[in-house]
Every structure is written in structure tokens, then in C-alpha cells.
Image: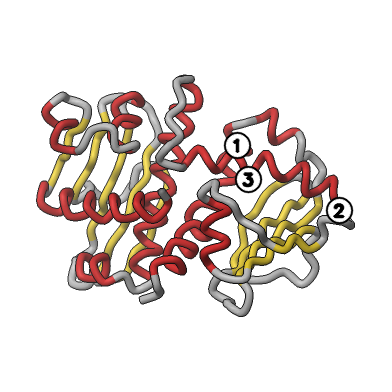
Amino acid sequence: MPDQKKLAALLLMKAALPLTKVLLEEKPQLARKFQGWNRVIQFQVKDDPELACHLLFDGGKLEYLSGRHPSPEIDFQFKDPAGFVALMTGKIALPRIKGALKNPGTLLSFLPLMLGLTLLLPNKLPNDPVRRALKVKLLLYFITVALSQLNRAGHEEMQRFTVNMPDRIFQWSVQPDGPAAYLRIHQGKTKAGKGIYPRRRPFVHMIFSSLDSAFLVLTGQIDNVQAMKQGHLVVDGSPEYGKDIAVIMKQIEGMIA
């Protein structure tokens, strides 16, 4: 299993950075700034092919891709995983930014999109209902992908949880028509997805009674036990497995704090 900093970097690179696409979908004003863009923004940790990805803008449409690009306009280069984690968690980071002098406008235009991801951080607790709803959506999408990536990275507790599990769905949803996400587990393999899994009833379904309820629970302001007592959360299915996966979710929160 990777050390904690590399593990945190993997989760942030593979589960958080792809959410830039969700930000553009949810923020039309921000998306308009990227209309017509045909550019590549890259992130990489020196001498580590696992920690490299790029955001490809094609006619303003954004796609997240793993690996290095041969000729990005902007290339954020970090000497170690800790530097990338610092950037993504709002701490002081000093990456080398290749292309910044040649393409300063591209860098300046891109930074607000990066700053939008700070909404994921545990200390960001917006009062505005629109931003709260966006945070809930981002957290649901992030946590399901992060759980899957944790398993693929060899995290011992997550692998023990998944290794002998038959084909099961862990579902999260917000009532009455809020965002939803799921994690599919089958014999040690995992796959995350957005929305309600369509093919079978979930093995565990964590149902938040409202966006405000989801916000309280997902930001750790109340724990699952309190949330269930107060009617914010219903766990439909195996409570034991729901508790186990909630413990691992808290570990992920600690990695990005």
C-alpha cells in the first residue's frame, strides 16, 4: 500500500480533480469562460507515473484523462505527493508551473476552476443553499470514487471489506430528488457511479431526508447515529456493513483535512 501522502494524492487526483467537469456543469457562468478552449492543463508528481493526469479542453468541453500529455499549455509539476496534496487542500504549495510565462492568460483563467474544488474541504461550510447543494453533490461523487480508488491502491481495511464480498451495491441518495451515487463491490473489485444503480436493489442504501440533512452528515456536523435518531438519515439494509463503510469514509475525510 502507498504511504499516506501518496494515498491522499492518489485520491485527490483521481476522485477530486475529475469534479472540475461537474463544476462546469453546475456553474454556467464559469463554463462560459472556457468556451472555445482547446488547451491542456496537466498535473504531475516528478518520477511517479501513477501521479500524473491532465484536463483536456476540446472546444470548451472538459475531459479528465490519466497519464501525461506530450504538450500541455500549463503543467503543474510537484517534487513529491505532499506538494500536490497541499495544493488541493488549500495549503501553501510551490509547484513548478511550466508554461506559466508563455500562457499567463490560460493559467489565470484556469485558477477559478481549481479554487472551486476547495468546496470539498471539511472546513468549507457555506450558508448559501445553492453552494450547500453543490457541496453535497461533490462530496457524494468524491467519496464513492475515493472509496473505489482506496481499494485499488491496496488500502488494507478497504480490501478486507471488499475481498470476499459478493456482487453488492452501496447506494447514497438525497430525498426527494437530490443527487445520488453508488459503489459496486464484487469479489474485491469496486466501481463507483453517479445516480441510482438501475439493475438491482442496493445491499445498503443510505437515504438522506433532505439536502440540509445530507449536508449535516456529510460534513461531519452530526454522526450517523445522531442523524438516524433525528430523522436526517435512514440506512436501509445491513446496518453493520453501513457502519463499516462509514468508518472508512471518515478516514478519507481525515486524509483531505
Q: Eyeballing the image, is 39 above or below 151?
A: above
Residue at 37 percent of width and 39 percent of height? 180
Q: Eyeballing the image, is 168 above or below 219?
A: below
Question: Type of residue at label 3?
Answer: Met
* Figure label count: 3
User: Could you tell whether 228 is left or right of 146 in the image?
Assistant: left
Question: Which label number is shown at residue 25?
Answer: 1
User: Could you tell whether 99 is left or right of 156 in the image?
Assistant: right
Number of other residues with Cα within 10 Å of mark 1, as a class: few under 14, some 14 to 19, many 20 or more = few
Specify whether residue 173 is in view. yes
Question: Which label number is shown at residue 114?
Answer: 3
Q: Are marks 2 and 1 in contact (CB under 8 Å)?
A: no
Specify whether residue 176 is in view. no
Question: Which label number is shown at residue 103?
Answer: 2
Residue 174 x, y percent position in the rendering: 32, 31
Residue mark closest to the camera, 2 vs 1: 2
Residue 238 x, y percent position in the rendering: 11, 49
> Tag 1 or tag 3, which sits nearer the N-term?
1
Judged from the image, the secondary structure of the residue bearing numbered disc 3 is helix
Residue at 11 percent of width and 47 percent of height? 239
- C-alpha distance separating marks 2 and 1: 25 Å
Q: Quadrant of residue 55?
A: bottom right
User: Could you tell whether 54 is left or right of 219 in the image?
Assistant: right
User: Could you tell whether 152 is left or right of 115 in the image?
Assistant: left
Question: Which label number is shown at residue 66?
Answer: none
Residue 136 x, y percent position in the rendering: 41, 35
